[in-house]
């Protein structure tokens, strides 16, 4: 093998390592949705899996329309009613004096490295009318599920308004995400909404743990429903 061939192979290997080892930058947005009154303010966080300096842009997508660029932190942290903050791993966008036209989904996008990646989106909901909190019901696994070794807990949210309820799960006081599946909100008659979230786990974990909590955030308030395994008859 010639020296030139060796150099080419080394360059190729280095290029592949940079491409594969670096990995795509993952952006995680919180909250999933936020409900705000007219004239209020809303803050959306965007957390990056790798440092991105301030190379972050934001887009706003109204229902039935394409996403529209609103601000790039690299060009300035302030633009009209939009205010940015943070650096590298944790950045935020604050929208002040909320107007009706601000409703929609907001996406963060990093342009620090290729490929460009987006966050999962945050839905901004404008509160109108009376706020009705959700009724929360937490159901234990059925006897059939236990017999199959696949226990699943069900958290049911009903009769709330406006939309925008988010669900998280805790087991023995610790938040869990594995095994969680939360469905989309569904609008029923009278403008009320329902939502279902489930937590599936192995029978071994079910037998090991005791306190299960379904935590619901709606219109700035958080409530929860709890269930103890030791009090279940299954």
Image: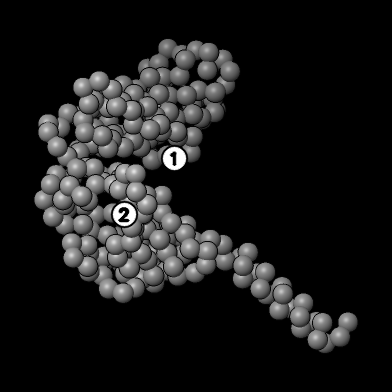
At x 22% / y 51%, what residue is drawn?
A: 102
Q: Nearer the viewer, residue 113 or 191?
A: 191
- Residue 60: assigned label: 2
- Report the Cα–Cα distance between label 2 and label 1: 27 Å
Question: Which residue is situated farthest in the front direction here?
Answer: 65
- Residue 28 lies, with reference to residue 224, above or below; the image says below
How far across and down, in percent of the image, does residue 216 sit?
28, 34
At x 44% / y 30%, what residue is drawn?
A: 199
- Residue 65 lies, with reference to residue 113, above or below; the image says above
How many neighbours does mark 2 have within 10 angstroms: few (below 14), some (14-19), or many (20 or more)? many
Residue 180 occupies quadrant: top left
Point out the tag, 2 or 1, that comes first from the N-terminus: 2
Report if the CB atoms under discs 2 and 1 are less than 8 Å apart: no
Residue 233 occupies quadrant: top left
At x 62% / y 67%, what residue is drawn?
A: 19
SS state under label 2: strand
Quadrant of the frame with the N terminus: bottom right
Q: Nearer the viewer, residue 64 or 151?
A: 64
How many neighbours does mark 1 have within 10 angstroms: few (below 14), some (14-19), or many (20 or more)? few
How far across and down, in percent of the image, does residue 29 sit?
36, 52
At x 34% / y 73%, what residue is drawn?
A: 74
Left or right of 128: which side holds 174?
Answer: right
- Can residue 51 be seen in this snapshot? no
Nearer the observer: mark 2 or 1; the answer is: 2
Left or right of 217: which side holds 173?
Answer: right
Residue position for label 1: 177
How far across and down, in percent of the image, does residue 26 sit?
47, 57
- Can residue 138 be seen in this snapshot? yes
SS state under label 1: loop
């Amino acid at each position: 093998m010639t020296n030139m061939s060796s150099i080419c192979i080394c360059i190729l290997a280095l290029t592949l390592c940079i491409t594969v080892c670096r990995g795509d930058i993952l952006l995680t947005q919180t909250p999933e949705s936020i409900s705000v009154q007219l004239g209020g303010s809303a803050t959306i966080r965007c957390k990056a899996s790798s440092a991105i300096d301030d190379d972050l842009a934001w887009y706003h997508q109204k229902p039935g329309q394409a996403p529209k660029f609103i601000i790039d932190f690299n060009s300035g942290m302030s633009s009209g009613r939009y205010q940015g903050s943070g650096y590298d791993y944790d950045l935020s966008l604050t929208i002040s004096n909320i107007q009706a036209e601000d409703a929609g989904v907001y996406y963060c996008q990093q342009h620090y490295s290729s490929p460009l990646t987006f966050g999962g989106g945050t839905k901004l909901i404008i509160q109108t009318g009376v706020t009705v909190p959700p009724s929360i019901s937490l159901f234990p696994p059925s006897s059939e599920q236990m017999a199959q070794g696949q226990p699943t807990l069900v958290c049911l949210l009903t009769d709330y308004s406006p939309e925008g309820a988010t669900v998280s799960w805790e087991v023995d006081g610790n938040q869990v995400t594995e095994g969680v599946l939360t469905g989309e909100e569904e609008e029923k008659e009278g403008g009320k909404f329902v939502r279902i979230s489930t937590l599936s786990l192995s029978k071994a974990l079910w037998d090991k743990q005791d306190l299960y909590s379904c935590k619901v955030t709606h219109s700035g308030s958080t409530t929860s429903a709890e269930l103890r395994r030791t009090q279940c008859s299954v």
